[in-house]
Amino acid sequence: MSTFSNTDTGNKTADPYTAKNLEDPSLKEKVEDLQSFIDKTKFCLLTTQTADSDLLASRAMALAAKEGNGFDLLFHTNTESGKTDDLKTHNSVNIGFINNSGEWASISGHASIETDREVVKKHYSPALKAWIGDLGDGTHDGGQDDPRIAIIRVKASTAQYAVSKRTAIGGFVELAKGVASGEAPSVNKLRHISEAEVKQWKSQ
C-alpha cells in the first residue's frame, strides 16, 4: 500500500501527537465513549459523493435515532432533495461530528433510503413540518404520512474519534506545556474502531 511522505525523520516518530494520544482500550469502552459523544453532539455533517461527478458534498444533519446496538445511525430526509439522488447512485458515506471544544468523530459506512411508513412513523417528529412544509394538497403536508419524508439509515463500518481526556483547563495547561517544550500534549483519547469490531459489537 502506497503512502505519502514529504520527509525522513529517521528513527523518530514523525507524528508525535498521534503516538502520544492513540489508545486501544476495551471495545466496550471505545464504543461507550463514542456513543456518549454522538448523543451529546447530535448534529453532524453527512458527506456523500455527488450523483453526477466524483466531487463530494456535505450537509448538516440532526441524528434522529440509533439502532443496531448504536451503529445504525438514522436521519430524517426529504426524498426529493439532492442527497437522495447522491445516495441512490453512491451509497458510501461519511458522518462527521464535532463540538466547540474540538472533540470529533468520523464514521464511515453505507447508507440506504427507507420509505416504509412504519419506519417513518416510528421516528417521526412534528418539527419536520417546519422543514418539509405543507404544500396544501392534503398529501404533502409535512405529516407522518407525507411521502416525501423518509429515513436515511447509515450502517457504520468503521469509526475514529478524539474526545478529551482532561478538563478544559487541564487541556489548556497541557497544550501550553507542549508549546513551551515542543513535546506533543496528551490531551485526547484518540481511538479507532475497525470494521471487525463494529460487526462484533452489533452481533451482541
Image (spheres, grey):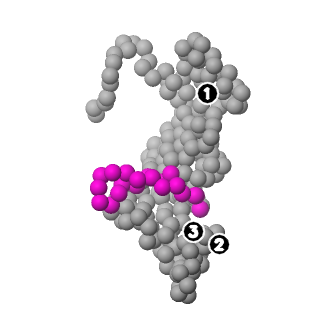
Q: Amino acid at mark 2?
A: Pro
Q: Can residue 202 be seen at all in this image of the molecule?
A: no
Q: Does 188 lie within the magenta span?
A: no
State the separation of the CA atoms marked 2 and 3.
Answer: 10 Å
Q: Amino acid at mark 3?
A: Trp
- Give the vertical position of 51 relative to 180 (above or below): below
- Give the vertical position of 160 relative to 43 (above or below): above
Classify mark 3: residues with Cα within 10 Å, few (<14), some (14-19) or many (20+).
few
Q: Tag on residue 126?
A: 2
Contact (CB < 8 A) between labels 1 and 3? no
Q: Tag on residue 83?
A: none
> Which dot, 2 or 3, sits closer to the camera?
3
Q: Quick one: SS at disc 1?
A: loop
Circle 3 residue: 131
Circle 1 residue: 187
State the separation of the CA atoms marked 2 and 1.
Answer: 40 Å
Q: Does 61 lie within the magenta span?
A: yes
Q: Which quadrant of the figure contains the N terminus?
A: top left
Looking at the rendering, the stretch of residues picked out in magenta corresponds to 45-64
**In x, y percent, where is residue 151?**
51, 67
**In x, y percent, where is residue 184?**
55, 20
Q: Which quadrant of the figure contains the C terminus?
A: bottom right
Q: Quick one: SS at disc 2?
A: loop
> Which dot, 2 or 1, sits closer to the camera?
2
Q: Amino acid at mark 1?
A: Val
Q: Please tell me whether the stretch drawn in magenta is mainly helix, strand or loop.
A: strand
N-terminal label among 2 and 1: 2
State the separation of the CA atoms marked 1 and 3.
Answer: 39 Å
